[in-house]
């Protein structure tokens, strides 16, 4: 049995009542993926402030730290109501979705009371300092160093593919504080101030014209030892909590964003008089079927959560499905429109419409949130029970 409208009726009624009063202020229509930018404008900030006052942010956090203490199924019900109203429920970036789970699981009470309210208020905006130029998808190969100097940690290194670094005030990063330890035992997980702290940020322009990713050169950046989560040398365990903070709370509703994107494509093709083409209709039917498969995966995840079963392997399957679907959708969106799909809208700089952006940015989704090659390994080992690949001597 999945989450239905009969589940959590009081909570659903509260969401619907609040949205009925405030929906006209919403600025974020429900969609598969927002533009790859981490810089919200004034209307977006006003909408987030309304959500903050209504306590519709950080739903799973304990009430002690400003949340509602909702379980995963309850969070799904809230997300479904926002999706039904046709608007997204924004998150407070990586601070809410990635850092907070690590602090709640591994941080001290003092750290929770200090860092969590700053995330909720918007005072701290985080970016992720995991990827490095020489490490590829193997996080254990990180080379960034952290050296203890009194009550502080001094950090030197190089990070890349950092989403939204140019707008962040804090970075949660992994650095190697014990170079003699086995590679999974030496890293530490540190919350590092970004501003005036020896961190040079260089935005990376993408094919879509946006600059959602950045590269950082870190020279003698400093953070107090009280900003180390989980203790020195325990960063791998903390990082696994962050990486495991996947999309379980959205898995029951994420198909709706892709469906709306699909409807926009079908509408444009209708306007162009292309829907009578059997090839166009066949391609659309195949894409629609894959979106429905995503919906079924969400139903299955809800069932397993309700039964208390782990969903990590199912989330790997889901990530593989939605990232490959979006890459195929972006390619189909341009191909089915013909030359009309290649014509950029007017405007300064490098403007692209939403379907062109889907094509240009969707390739990177095969890498984001864990490469699809890694997801296939997880599925092979945890779902199919296949042996692990032998490591070279």
Image: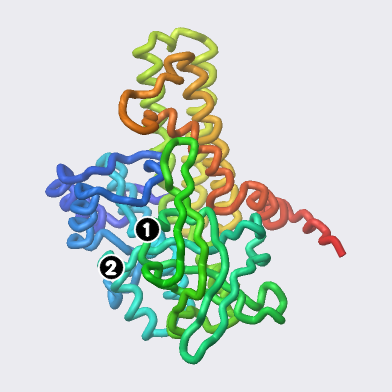
User: What SS does tag 1 mark?
Assistant: helix
Picture coordinates of residue 6, whole percent (x, y)? 31, 50
Asked where in the image residue 31 lies, by quadrant, the reply is top left
Asked whether the viewer can see residue 159, the reply is yes
Marks 2/1: CA distance? 12 Å
In the image shown, does 168 or 184 lie closer to the viewer? 168
In the image, residue 24 above or below residue 135: above
Total numbered labels placed on residues in the image: 2
Q: Residues within 10 Å of mark 2 (few under 14, many from 20)?
A: few
What residue is rendered at 23% in x and 43% in y?
27
Q: Is residue 378 above or below residue 99?
A: above
Q: Is residue 161 above or below residue 195?
A: above
Element under disc 2: loop
Q: Residue furthest bottom?
A: 150
Q: Which mark is first along the chain, 1 or 2?
A: 1
- Number of the label disc, if any, that sits on residue 93: 1
**Picture coordinates of residue 108, whole percent (x, y):** 43, 84
- Quadrant where the C terminus sits is bottom right
Answer left or right for 210 relative to 79: right
Comparing labels 2 and 1, the label whose residue is closer to the camera: 2
Residue 1 in view of the camera: no
**In the displayed structure image, the side of residue 249 where residue 142 appears, left or right:** right
Which residue is depicted at the point 72% across and 77% down? 182
Question: Which of 99/212 is in front?
Answer: 212
Crowding at label 1, few (<14), some or many (≥20) Cα neighbours within 10 Å?
some
Q: Is residue 52 left or right of residue 6?
A: left
Residue drawn where x is 44% and y is 73% of the image: 191
* Residue that mark 2 sits on: 123
Query: In front here: 376 or 352?
Result: 352
**Residue 116 appears at what percent x and percent y?**
34, 73
Q: Position of residue 10 (x, y in %)?
A: 23, 58
Left or right of 126? Residue 285 is right
């Amino acid at each position: 049995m999945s989450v239905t409208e009969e589940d959590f009726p009081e909570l659903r009624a509260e969401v619907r009542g609040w949205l009925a009063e405030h929906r006209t202020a919403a600025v974020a229509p429900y969609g598969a993926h927002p533009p790859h930018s981490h810089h919200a404008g004034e209307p977006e900030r006003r909408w987030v402030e309304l959500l903050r006052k209504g306590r519709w942010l950080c739903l799973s956090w304990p009430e002690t730290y400003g949340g509602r203490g909702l379980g995963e199924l309850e969070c799904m019900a809230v997300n479904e109501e926002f999706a039904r109203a046709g608007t997204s429920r924004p998150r407070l970036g990586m601070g809410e979705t990635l850092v907070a789970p690590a602090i709640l699981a591994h941080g001290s009470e003092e750290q929770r009371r200090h860092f969590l309210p700053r995330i909720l208020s918007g005072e701290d905006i985080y970016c992720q300092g995991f990827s490095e130029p020489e490490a590829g998808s193997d996080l254990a190969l990180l080379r960034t160093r952290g050296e203890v100097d009194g009550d502080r940690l001094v950090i030197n290194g190089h990070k890349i593919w950092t989403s939204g670094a140019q707008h962040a005030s804090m970075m949660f990063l992994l650095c190697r504080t014990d170079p003699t330890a086995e590679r999974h035992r030496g890293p530490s997980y540190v919350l590092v101030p970004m501003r005036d702290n020896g961190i040079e940020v260089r935005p990376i322009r993408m094919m879509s014209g946006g600059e959602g990713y950045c590269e950082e050169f870190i020279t003698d950046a400093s953070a107090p030892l009280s900003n180390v989560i989980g203790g020195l040398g325990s960063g791998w365990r903390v990082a696994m909590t962050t990486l495991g903070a996947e999309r379980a709370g959205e898995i029951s509703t994420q198909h709706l964003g892709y469906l709306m994107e699909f409807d926009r494509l079908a509408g444009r093709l209708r306007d162009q008089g292309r829907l009578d083409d059997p090839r166009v209709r066949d391609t659309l039917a195949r894409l629609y079927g894959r979106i429905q498969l995503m919906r079924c995966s969400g139903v299955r995840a809800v069932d397993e959560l309700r039964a208390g079963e782990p969903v990590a392997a199912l989330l790997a399957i889901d990530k593989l499905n939605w990232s490959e679907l979006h890459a195929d959708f972006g390619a189909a969106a341009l191909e089915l429109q013909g030359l009309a799909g290649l014509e950029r809208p007017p405007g300064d700089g490098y403007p692209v419409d939403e379907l062109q952006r889907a094509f240009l940015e969707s390739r990177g989704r095969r890498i984001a949130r864990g490469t699809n090659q890694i997801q296939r390994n997880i599925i092979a080992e945890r779902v199919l029970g296949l042996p692990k690949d032998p490591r070279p001597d």
